[in-house]
Image: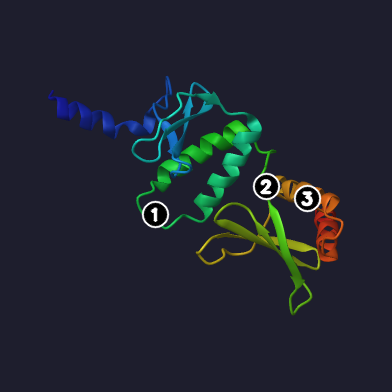
Amino acid sequence: MTDSSVVEQRASGLASFQTGQADILVLRVIGRPSGGLVDIITYSDGEFTLRFGPGRPGVRVPFFVRVLELRELAALLDALQDQVDHPPADRNLDLVALRAFVEVLAQKVGPGASNRFGEARFAGISKDAGGGIVGHLGLGVDTAGTVHDAGGRVTFSFQVIPLPPGPFQPLSPPDLDSLVAALTAYLDDTPEADPLWRELLTDLRTGKD
């Protein structure tokens, strides 16, 4: 029997494949250059680690490897999930690999954690023609979001600038908890905030109950 026939025979029998061991040799995401450095996050031996690469020629790269903490992983998961839901225009990005990374990261973080709105910046808020509350948030350097409260039914639209906003969708319970916590902290620190933000917070809390 030739090598090729062995391969063909084994490949045709994969429906009865039994796993004896599973390995991920390289599961990694590499960020875009920022401050002369590139963040490299790798999954290995059950841990996610952060190290750096040069963002441009001539940059000195610190030799530093750090195991990421759960709160940092939760923030990373939120950022990557947004990119999976709203893929960037870069056609060179391997979305299959990104989704695989997100799946493993989600298993590590667990279903109850979200830091999606941990760094949210609350901006303008108003009422639309139908009386619904529309609040605008900054989420990152080039990401934003809009919260829509229609009589207590709260949905959220994510936007990668300068792309158009995505569809309005309900928030998951962990994301809802994250938004409530962020908005509560904002209102505690900003007594002069528009009263509509407090009205929105009341509806968010009602929706959680």
Q: Residue at x 22, y 29 (%)?
A: 7
Q: Nearer the viewer, residue 90 or 102?
A: 90
Q: Which residue is mark 1?
A: 90
- Residue 68, horizontal then vertical, whole percent: 58, 29
- Can you name the residue that lies furthest to the bottom here? 129
Q: In what quadrant of the picture does the N terminus appear?
A: top left
Q: Which residue is mark 2?
A: 119
For the residue carrying disc 1, how many other residues have a C-alpha within 10 Å: few (<14), some (14-19), or many (20+)?
A: few
Identity of the amino acid at label 3?
Answer: Val
Looking at marks 2 and 3 on the same chain, the residue that comes earlier in the sequence is marked by 2
Left or right side of 103 for 55: left
- Residue 77, horizontal then vertical, whole percent: 58, 41
Q: Residue at x 43, y 20 (%)?
A: 21
Single out the mark in the foreground, 2 or 3: 2
Q: Secondary structure at mark 2?
A: loop
Q: Nearer the viewer, residue 90 or 2?
A: 90
For the residue carrying disc 3, how many other residues have a C-alpha within 10 Å: few (<14), some (14-19), or many (20+)?
A: many
Q: CA distance from mark 3 to mark 1?
A: 33 Å
Residue 23 sits in which quadrant? top left
Q: Which residue is mark 3?
A: 180
Looking at marks 1 and 2 on the same chain, the residue that comes earlier in the sequence is marked by 1
Looking at marks 3 and 1 on the same chain, the residue that comes earlier in the sequence is marked by 1
Q: Is residue 6 visible?
A: yes
